[in-house]
Amino acid sequence: MFTHKFGAPMHEKGITGLETAIILIAFVVVASVFAFTVLSTGIFASERSKETVFAGLEEAKSSIEPRGSVIAYKGKVGSTETLYKVSFFVSNAIAGEPVDLTAPYTEGEDGTDPDIVSNAEYRTVISFTDKNQHLPDVPWTLDWVGNDNGDSLLEEGEKAEITVWLLERNTGTAIGSDDSVGEYAAVDVNGASGILQDSGTLIGTNDQFTLEVKPESGAVLTIQRTSPPRLDTVMDLK
């Protein structure tokens, strides 16, 4: 307590330099912690964003894309005309990662087609959907067109023809001949029950169907088409 020059007491309060330093240090520490938290959050968010972008790029790089038209072939079950197989061409999208196209079935020049490959370790699955049914794993075969390095990987510069079999062709007669009754039947899927068993599930005229090609990684290739008003021996579904 101090005494005024006129004799009245005077009270004065203040802070020392040490107290000021402590307060400043506290502000600096709090600001540093906050800045570190914000910086760490930003770095984490950036890393997650980068991982998402790279994952998207990998997904795209491992994709396949269609090349050209979708070709359908007419068959008969009894006296009912239907589609018995559908073919289309694919290539590697944007020079991406190779896609494993090991096929679960093969086809020959004569006899019954397709022929199942015993213990085939195929990683690409094709599903079929129409208004009557969904078939998650239909038989399909593969033929290479043009460049082919001898393996089952679809790589840059290569094209492959995928044929999806909806019916089994029990004849060696060339396509285009007048097929007799009983030459087409349901295909056994991996030795189990067949598909498209009766006339109610066969693809007729003006029937829409969807094929989904699902590789081990990468985007799913979806092909949706409608059968024409009249079924010819060979049909370009565009």
Image (tube, rainbow, N blue to C red):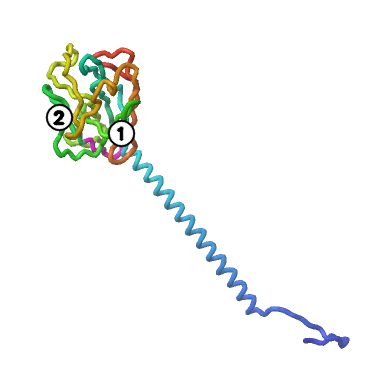
Q: Is residue 40 visible to us here?
A: yes
Considering only vertical position in the picture, is 14 above or below 88?
below
Residue 203 percent across, percent down from the top left: 29, 21
Considering only vertical position in the picture, is 39 above or below 209?
below
Q: Residue at x 20, y 36 (%)?
A: 102
Q: Residues within 10 Å of mark 1 (few under 14, many from 20)?
A: many
Residue 40 percent across, percent down from the top left: 47, 59
Q: Residue at x 14, y 21 (%)?
A: 170
* Magenta range: 94-101
Which residue in the protein does label 2 denote?
Answer: 115
* Foreground residue among 84 and 12: 84
Q: In the structure shown, which secondary structural element does the residue marked by tag 2 occupy?
A: strand
Question: In the image, what residue type sits under mark 2?
Answer: Asp
- The answer to which quarter of the image holds residue 188 is top left
- The answer to which quarter of the image holds residue 128 is top left
Q: CA distance from mark 2 to mark 1?
A: 25 Å
Question: In the image, what residue type sits under mark 1?
Answer: Ile
Q: Does 138 sit left or right of 238 as displayed? A: left
* Foreground residue among 229 and 36: 229
Which residue in the protein does label 1 denote?
Answer: 64
Residue 177 lies in the magenta-colored region:
no
Q: In which quadrant is the N terminus drawn?
A: bottom right
